[in-house]
Amino acid sequence: MARKKDEAVVITGASAGVGRATAHRFAKVGARIGLIARDAEALAEVKKEVEKLGGEAFIAAADVADADALFAAAEALAEKLGPIDVWVNDAMVTVFSPFAEMAPEEFRRVTEVTYLGFVHGTMAALRLMGKRNRGTIVQVGSSLAYRGIPLQSAYCGAKHGIRGFTNSLRTELIHDASDIHITVVNLPGVNTPQFDWARTHIAWQPRPVPPVIQPEVAANAIYRAAHERRREYWLGLSTAEVILGNMVGADYLDRYLARKAYDGQMTNKLVKRTRKDNLVRPVHALHHTHGSFDDEAKRRATQLPAPATRMTAIAAGIVGAGFLVALGRKVFAARF
């Protein structure tokens, strides 16, 4: 696949965090980039950044939860970009809350953006790529697609859903002998603004599950995934450990996370009463690439292709189990 000025890329959730960093990454090789998010003003800022880095950018403000709006945005961008080579689904929202304290409309909204937004984005990508029977769709996933944690039931459910939906679609593409490739990049905790603007029903300011990486690390992984033809990637050893550990020690992790993962997702700062959240409407002032955890976020992480065969996965799971038994609390205290 071409990687220079003739490469056309569309990114959802492009106004902040991993999506914004991914736009920067593609811009560095001169790509033409379509930027989708709700906040047109924030997208205009990203457009300027892309152009400074050597890329070309076009914006289309849309809420990915609105299928018709997203389809219209995709068509408008395709008219300017030409045939789409890469589509990156990244848009997300979350609510930090015990499930019992969430309102149905909050859970629904997280699902509509974080799960159905990927479904709508994938539909749009297939409509555009199907005309040439060529292209790559990158789903920005999470280790939480394999291992649910407390206080993020809606987000974990959405990421699990993305994984199942993507696996199903992949089999259909193979059946149809399609040359459209779909891949998933599962991330660990990332230092993005989501912890500053996500809705929360907990008293303390939320934080990412450590170890934390910078958005640029995720962007590099997404760029690599867009140009290879592997089904899935695990970014960071912590992601591999969580996924493999869950394969062989799910009961243990249930109990451990019940004890440790509440406090592990909270800072020692109280949530301000004036805090605004982006669940329904954007919070323009917080549209940054980085969040509030620069002091601990790592600038490197190992990118591992997921085990290619069941036997490899089982063997890796056995190794992971031994690793968990050997390190026990020390390992997960560092992560949760």
Image: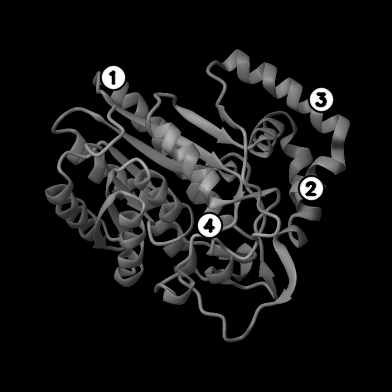
Q: Say if 286 sits above or below 15 in the image.
A: below
Q: Which residue is mark 1?
A: 175
Residue at image coords 15%, 30%: 132
* Residue 195 pos. (x, y %): 59, 65
Of the two numbered discs 3 and 1 on the same chain, state the one appearing first in sequence: 1
Q: Residue at x 24, y 23 (%)?
A: 178
Amino acid type of the residue tagged 4 in the rendering:
Ala
Q: Please tell me which of labels 2 and 1 falls first in the chain.
A: 1
Q: Residues within 10 Å of mark 3 (few under 14, many from 20)?
A: some
Q: Amino acid at mark 2?
A: Ala
Say what amino acid the circle numbered 1 marks. Answer: His
What residue did someone put label 4 on?
154
Residue found at the far top of this picture? 311
Cα–Cα gap, marks 3 and 1 = 38 Å
Determine which residue is flagged by label 3.
322
C-alpha span from label 4 to label 1: 32 Å
Q: Secondary structure at mark 4?
A: helix
Residue 48 at x, y = what percent?
32, 62
Say whether marks 3 and 2 touch (CB < 8 Å): no
Q: Nearer the viewer, residue 125 or 34?
A: 34
Q: Quadrant of residue 40?
A: bottom left
Q: How crowded is the residue under tag 1: few (<14 C-alpha within 10 Å), some, or many (20+)?
A: few
For badge 3, the amino acid type reads Gly
Label 3 or label 2, whichever lies nearer to me, is 2
